Amino acid sequence: MRQFHISKLVVSGDGKDDAIIDFASGLTVISGPSNSGKSCILNCIDYCFGGGNRPLDESFGYERVRLELSSQEEKVSISRCFGSNQADVMSTVSYVESGTYFAGRGKSKRLQSLSSVWLSLIGIEEEPAVIKNKHFKTNTMSWRMLSPLFFLDEEKVDTKASALLPRESTAKTSLLSSLIYLIEGKALSGFDVNDSAEIKEAKVQAVKDYAHMSLTKIRERITQINSELDLWGDMDLVVEIDKLLDQIKSTEKELVNATNQSQELYAQTDELKQEQVNKEVLLSRYYALKTQLEADLRRLSFINQAEDISSSIKQPQTCPFCDALLKERDAEKHEESLRAEFKKTFQQHQGLLETIDSLKQEITYGKQEQAQFAQQIDALQNLIHAKLTPRFNQVKNQYHSLKQLLELKNEKSILENLVSMWNQDMYDWVDSSNQKEEEYHPRDILGSLFVDGMSTIASEILKETNFTNLDLVRFNMSSFDLDINGSKKETFQGKGYRSFINTVLLLTMRKYLYETACFSPGILLVDTPFLGLDEGETFEISDGMKVGMFKYFLEHQEEGQLIIIENTEHTPQLDYDSSVSKHIVFTKSTERGRYGFLPDVK
């Protein structure tokens, strides 16, 4: 939870000595005689909260106020001139931007509100919307709206009404909604704003008119559907659709089979074509080999003829080169080799001719088989495109037509049911709209846990402050105040008693928020907790109660900063000075101590 404290107040004016108050982070007690300027201090602080009243009389000559704040060792300074609806903010805090803010009533189109700075200092990043009346209408939560929870000025400290509630009755619901926001950490949601009787009646009539117009359109559509259904007679659409689905499945199966057969034939044709190509290439090679063998046969025949001719010529007996005798058997051996070669080549030629004839027959057969495949493919394609596909499309179109009719029939049934339901719902809605609307009651939301918590804390505080004859303390949700020993506060006539109890009430709220709330203001400012003590009391405020009250202030500084204004005679002599507390005394004397708040006002 973010926390801050007010560290310094400076009031200045042209030609005037600055009026400066340095505050402790815990308790600051400012005491002095009447008319020493004590209450002006809280007025100036309230002015920096966004208050609208000028905090000092114009005749004093002071023109501006500056409030310095500390938050986690960072600084924020808020300066505002008297009579201005703007405030200047200087900040080293990351979540507060320096600049000019709007400090007047309402909202500014150009400037952010000063309230957003104060809310950011306690962890509320955006100004939330809170419910402002029993009809769930909302307005924006502001720091000023929260101020009754932590700011008790001299005019209100002795009030007979609850010191926690604003004086304006119209603002009470907003304050209670803001309190719920602080406790819960979020705005209430899920509520609809209730309308006035005129707006409510207009809305009911508008809904009736809209419903009548919609029902008229629905009935027109039902009539249109009936005219389309009448064209088909009393056909059982479900049965006919089932028949068409069977035909679609059967035709689809035939299409698949024909397509598969066609694909197989295409594959076989491709394979056969490849075989034909291979055979044509082989035949070409055989023809080339045949030509080669025939050339070999002619060559061998030529050689043989040459041998026959040369045999009739007388052969030399000796070698013409070396005169060696030639053997006759060598010539015979050559002749035999020639005959063997010729025979072998002739046989190869004859075998090749037979192979060529066989291969040519295979090629011829392959062409015939290829032609048969082409005929079968043409027949299948004709079956697919001329018969099966048109039949499939025709059945499919019939199916879609009947399906659309079935959808129309279903639509008609749905629309008829809708007309019936709308009529009934309209009657029910009109009846319910005439009933009393739910109202918003924030006290019910706060509930018994809040009452018990506040009662327990108030009892503890009253005991610590030495309240005499204390038997029973109860927080009254209805009056939003404390009932003590079964009696309401207003039954006691003394201002001093009411001031004391009102101070206890705000201390109770401070501790409750400190212990249980998601966001807590963390400060409490009280002007004269014993105001009116000298005016005659039916209930006596003892010195022990005064001491007990101020001791409580000292012993509970961890709950946040506390600034107390009190008259000198009602301020107990205690040790106030420490690292987190201090006592500032105004003497209203020029000879000793500090005269008062404003140096130039005597």
Image (cartoon, rainbow, N blue to C red):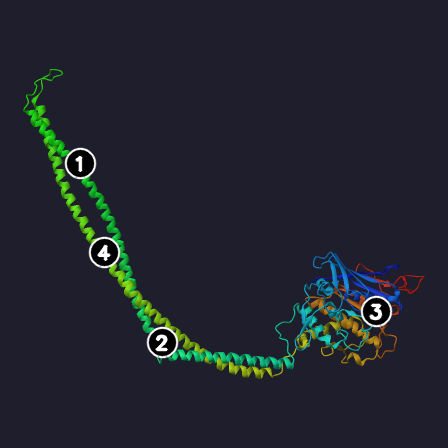
Q: How much space separates mark 4 and mark 2, taking CA atoms?
A: 44 Å
Residue 563 visible, this angle: yes
Labelled pair 4, 2 in contact (Cβ < 8 Å): no
Q: Earlier in the sequence, mark 3 or mark 1?
A: 1
Q: Earlier in the sequence, mark 4 or mark 1?
A: 1
Q: For the residue carrying disc 4, how many other residues have a C-alpha within 10 Å: few (<14), some (14-19), or many (20+)? A: some
Say which of 163 and 325 sits in front.
325
Residue 240: assigned label: none
Q: How much space separates mark 3 and mark 1, taking CA atoms?
A: 142 Å
188 relative to 582, above or below: below
200 relative to 526, above or below: below
Residue 292: assigned label: 1
Q: Secondary structure at mark 2?
A: helix
Give the residue pinned by disc 2: 238
Q: How much space separates mark 4 and mark 1, taking CA atoms?
A: 38 Å
Under mark 3, the amino acid is: Val
Q: How much space separates mark 1 and mark 2, taking CA atoms?
A: 81 Å
Residue 547: assigned label: 3
Which of the 4 image quadrants contains residue 479?
A: bottom right
Q: Secondary structure at mark 3?
A: helix
Say whether residue 351 is left or right of residue 197.
left
Q: Earlier in the sequence, mark 1 or mark 2?
A: 2
Q: How much space separates mark 3 and mark 2, taking CA atoms?
A: 95 Å
Residue 337 visible, this angle: no
**Residue 119 x/y as whole percent:** 71, 64
Give the residue pinned by disc 4: 373
Between marks 1 and 2 in the image, the one whose residue lies nearer the viewer = 1
Under mark 4, the amino acid is: Phe
Which residue, as the protein is rendered here, is positioned at the far top? Answer: 323
**Residue 85 x/y as whole percent:** 77, 65
